[in-house]
Image (cartoon, helix red, strand yellow):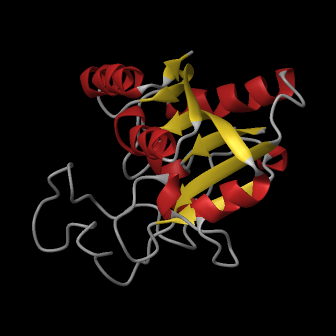
Amino acid sequence: MARALLVIDVQNDFTEGGALGVDGGAAVAAGITAYLEAHPGRYDQVIASRDWHHGDDDNGGHFATDAAPDFVTSWPRHCVAGTSGAEYHPAFDVSLVDLHIRKGQGVPAYSIFEGTTDDGTAFPDVLAQLGVTAVDVVGIATDYCVRASALDALDAGLEVTVLSGLVAAVNPVSGAAALVELEDAGARIG
Protein backbone atom coordinates (compact mmCIF):
# COMPACT_ATOMS: atom_id res chain seq x y z
CA MET A 1 0.00 0.00 0.00
CA ALA A 2 1.93 2.97 -1.32
CA ARG A 3 0.95 6.64 -1.60
CA ALA A 4 2.13 8.82 -4.48
CA LEU A 5 2.00 12.53 -5.18
CA LEU A 6 1.00 13.21 -8.79
CA VAL A 7 2.35 16.56 -9.97
CA ILE A 8 0.47 17.44 -13.13
CA ASP A 9 2.01 19.59 -15.89
CA VAL A 10 3.86 22.28 -13.91
CA GLN A 11 5.44 23.58 -17.11
CA ASN A 12 6.50 26.95 -18.42
CA ASP A 13 3.81 27.04 -21.11
CA PHE A 14 1.10 26.60 -18.44
CA THR A 15 2.38 29.34 -16.15
CA GLU A 16 2.25 33.10 -16.52
CA GLY A 17 3.84 34.23 -19.78
CA GLY A 18 3.55 30.79 -21.40
CA ALA A 19 1.60 29.80 -24.51
CA LEU A 20 -1.36 28.80 -22.30
CA GLY A 21 -0.38 30.59 -19.12
CA VAL A 22 -2.64 30.14 -16.11
CA ASP A 23 -2.86 32.82 -13.43
CA GLY A 24 -1.29 31.42 -10.29
CA GLY A 25 0.74 28.79 -12.13
CA ALA A 26 4.11 30.03 -10.89
CA ALA A 27 2.77 30.15 -7.33
CA VAL A 28 1.62 26.54 -7.68
CA ALA A 29 5.11 25.53 -8.85
CA ALA A 30 6.72 27.22 -5.84
CA GLY A 31 4.01 25.90 -3.51
CA ILE A 32 4.55 22.30 -4.57
CA THR A 33 8.28 22.62 -3.90
CA ALA A 34 7.64 24.15 -0.47
CA TYR A 35 5.07 21.45 0.33
CA LEU A 36 7.46 18.63 -0.55
CA GLU A 37 10.29 20.22 1.42
CA ALA A 38 8.00 20.61 4.44
CA HIS A 39 6.78 17.00 4.25
CA PRO A 40 9.78 14.78 3.48
CA GLY A 41 8.93 11.12 3.41
CA ARG A 42 5.16 11.67 3.16
CA TYR A 43 5.07 9.93 -0.23
CA ASP A 44 6.50 6.66 -1.40
CA GLN A 45 6.76 8.18 -4.89
CA VAL A 46 6.59 11.67 -6.34
CA ILE A 47 5.57 11.38 -9.99
CA ALA A 48 5.46 14.39 -12.33
CA SER A 49 3.83 14.57 -15.75
CA ARG A 50 4.55 16.86 -18.65
CA ASP A 51 2.66 17.57 -21.84
CA TRP A 52 5.20 16.60 -24.49
CA HIS A 53 3.86 17.32 -27.95
CA HIS A 54 5.43 16.92 -31.37
CA GLY A 55 6.05 20.26 -33.04
CA ASP A 56 5.79 19.09 -36.62
CA ASP A 57 2.09 18.24 -36.77
CA ASP A 58 -1.28 19.04 -35.23
CA ASN A 59 -0.94 16.26 -32.63
CA GLY A 60 -4.16 14.53 -33.62
CA GLY A 61 -6.11 17.79 -33.87
CA HIS A 62 -4.92 19.03 -30.48
CA PHE A 63 -3.17 22.02 -32.06
CA ALA A 64 -5.30 24.43 -34.05
CA THR A 65 -3.49 24.83 -37.35
CA ASP A 66 -5.84 26.34 -39.94
CA ALA A 67 -8.47 27.89 -37.67
CA ALA A 68 -8.56 29.69 -34.38
CA PRO A 69 -8.34 27.37 -31.36
CA ASP A 70 -11.60 26.72 -29.54
CA PHE A 71 -9.82 26.33 -26.17
CA VAL A 72 -11.88 23.21 -25.47
CA THR A 73 -10.48 20.57 -27.82
CA SER A 74 -8.04 22.58 -29.94
CA TRP A 75 -5.30 24.78 -28.56
CA PRO A 76 -2.43 27.01 -29.64
CA ARG A 77 0.90 25.22 -29.95
CA HIS A 78 2.21 24.47 -26.47
CA CYS A 79 4.62 22.19 -24.63
CA VAL A 80 6.46 21.19 -27.80
CA ALA A 81 9.22 18.70 -27.01
CA GLY A 82 12.62 20.34 -26.83
CA THR A 83 11.33 23.88 -26.22
CA SER A 84 11.56 25.90 -23.02
CA GLY A 85 7.75 25.90 -22.84
CA ALA A 86 7.77 22.13 -22.34
CA GLU A 87 10.24 22.33 -19.44
CA TYR A 88 9.17 22.34 -15.82
CA HIS A 89 8.72 25.78 -14.26
CA PRO A 90 11.98 26.78 -12.50
CA ALA A 91 10.22 27.20 -9.14
CA PHE A 92 9.38 23.47 -9.16
CA ASP A 93 12.38 21.57 -7.75
CA VAL A 94 12.57 18.49 -9.96
CA SER A 95 15.21 16.93 -7.71
CA LEU A 96 12.25 16.04 -5.47
CA VAL A 97 10.65 13.93 -8.27
CA ASP A 98 11.15 10.17 -8.38
CA LEU A 99 9.59 9.49 -11.78
CA HIS A 100 8.77 11.56 -14.88
CA ILE A 101 5.87 10.83 -17.23
CA ARG A 102 5.38 12.29 -20.71
CA LYS A 103 1.94 12.51 -22.31
CA GLY A 104 0.48 13.80 -25.55
CA GLN A 105 3.25 12.51 -27.76
CA GLY A 106 1.55 13.08 -31.11
CA VAL A 107 -2.00 12.81 -29.73
CA PRO A 108 -4.31 14.82 -27.49
CA ALA A 109 -3.77 13.81 -23.86
CA TYR A 110 -5.01 15.37 -20.65
CA SER A 111 -4.56 12.66 -18.01
CA ILE A 112 -1.28 11.38 -16.62
CA PHE A 113 -2.83 7.94 -17.15
CA GLU A 114 -2.35 8.48 -20.91
CA GLY A 115 1.40 8.95 -20.45
CA THR A 116 4.49 6.78 -20.40
CA THR A 117 7.93 6.70 -18.84
CA ASP A 118 10.96 7.41 -21.01
CA ASP A 119 11.28 3.67 -21.65
CA GLY A 120 7.66 3.47 -22.86
CA THR A 121 6.06 1.87 -19.79
CA ALA A 122 2.40 2.91 -19.56
CA PHE A 123 1.57 4.92 -16.45
CA PRO A 124 -1.09 2.50 -15.10
CA ASP A 125 1.53 -0.28 -15.30
CA VAL A 126 3.98 1.90 -13.36
CA LEU A 127 1.44 2.39 -10.57
CA ALA A 128 0.77 -1.35 -10.41
CA GLN A 129 4.51 -2.14 -10.28
CA LEU A 130 4.96 0.37 -7.45
CA GLY A 131 1.94 -0.89 -5.51
CA VAL A 132 0.35 2.56 -5.42
CA THR A 133 -3.15 2.52 -3.90
CA ALA A 134 -3.57 6.19 -2.98
CA VAL A 135 -2.64 9.42 -4.72
CA ASP A 136 -2.64 13.10 -3.91
CA VAL A 137 -2.99 15.26 -7.03
CA VAL A 138 -1.58 18.78 -7.55
CA GLY A 139 -0.69 20.94 -10.54
CA ILE A 140 -2.07 22.68 -13.59
CA ALA A 141 -4.80 23.05 -14.71
CA THR A 142 -7.55 22.17 -12.26
CA ASP A 143 -10.25 22.20 -14.92
CA TYR A 144 -8.36 20.12 -17.51
CA CYS A 145 -5.37 17.90 -16.79
CA VAL A 146 -5.71 17.78 -12.99
CA ARG A 147 -9.40 16.93 -13.38
CA ALA A 148 -8.74 14.24 -16.02
CA SER A 149 -5.91 12.69 -14.00
CA ALA A 150 -7.93 12.57 -10.77
CA LEU A 151 -10.96 11.06 -12.54
CA ASP A 152 -8.77 8.38 -14.12
CA ALA A 153 -7.21 7.65 -10.73
CA LEU A 154 -10.71 7.16 -9.29
CA ASP A 155 -11.63 4.92 -12.24
CA ALA A 156 -8.49 2.87 -11.48
CA GLY A 157 -9.80 2.26 -7.95
CA LEU A 158 -7.30 4.49 -6.19
CA GLU A 159 -7.96 6.63 -3.14
CA VAL A 160 -7.69 10.20 -4.46
CA THR A 161 -7.12 13.53 -2.73
CA VAL A 162 -6.81 16.78 -4.67
CA LEU A 163 -4.79 19.34 -2.72
CA SER A 164 -6.85 22.41 -3.63
CA GLY A 165 -4.22 24.87 -2.43
CA LEU A 166 -1.72 23.49 -4.94
CA VAL A 167 -3.72 23.69 -8.16
CA ALA A 168 -4.48 26.51 -10.61
CA ALA A 169 -7.38 26.67 -13.06
CA VAL A 170 -7.69 28.07 -16.56
CA ASN A 171 -10.97 29.62 -15.44
CA PRO A 172 -11.98 30.09 -11.79
CA VAL A 173 -15.59 29.05 -12.50
CA SER A 174 -14.73 25.84 -14.35
CA GLY A 175 -11.94 25.15 -11.83
CA ALA A 176 -14.41 25.31 -8.93
CA ALA A 177 -16.85 23.13 -10.90
CA ALA A 178 -14.08 20.57 -11.50
CA LEU A 179 -13.41 20.30 -7.76
CA VAL A 180 -17.13 19.77 -7.08
CA GLU A 181 -17.26 17.13 -9.82
CA LEU A 182 -14.23 15.35 -8.38
CA GLU A 183 -15.67 15.38 -4.87
CA ASP A 184 -18.98 14.02 -6.18
CA ALA A 185 -17.02 11.27 -7.96
CA GLY A 186 -15.37 10.21 -4.71
CA ALA A 187 -12.20 12.29 -4.43
CA ARG A 188 -11.33 14.05 -1.20
CA ILE A 189 -10.63 17.76 -1.65
CA GLY A 190 -7.94 18.80 0.80
The quadrant of the image that shows the C terminus is top right
Position of residue 92 relative to residue 125, above or below, is above
Q: Which residue is drawn at 58% across and 39% down?
A: 158
* Image side of residue 147 versus residue 139, left or right: left
Instruction: Say whether residue 16 is visible.
Output: no
Position of residue 4 relative to residue 181, above or below, is below
The residue sitting at the bottom extreme is 56
Q: Position of residue 59 (x, y in %)?
A: 33, 75
Q: Where is residue 180 in the image (x, y as percent from the top left)?
A: 34, 19
Depth check: 117 or 72 in front? 117
Depth check: 156 or 105 in front? 156
Q: Position of residue 188 (x, y in %)?
A: 52, 19
The quadrant of the image that shows the N terminus is top right
Q: Residue at x 70, y 49 (%)?
A: 47
Q: Where is residue 178 in the image (x, y as percent from the top left)?
A: 33, 28
Where is residue 76, by image quadrant?
bottom left
Numbered marks: total: 0
* Image side of residue 11 versus residue 40, left or right: left
Where is residue 40, by image quadrant?
top right
Depth check: 65 or 175 in front? 175
Q: Residue at x 20, y 67 (%)?
A: 64
Q: Residue at x 75, y 44 (%)?
A: 46
The residue sitting at the left extreme is 67
Instruction: Say whether residue 50 is visible.
Output: yes
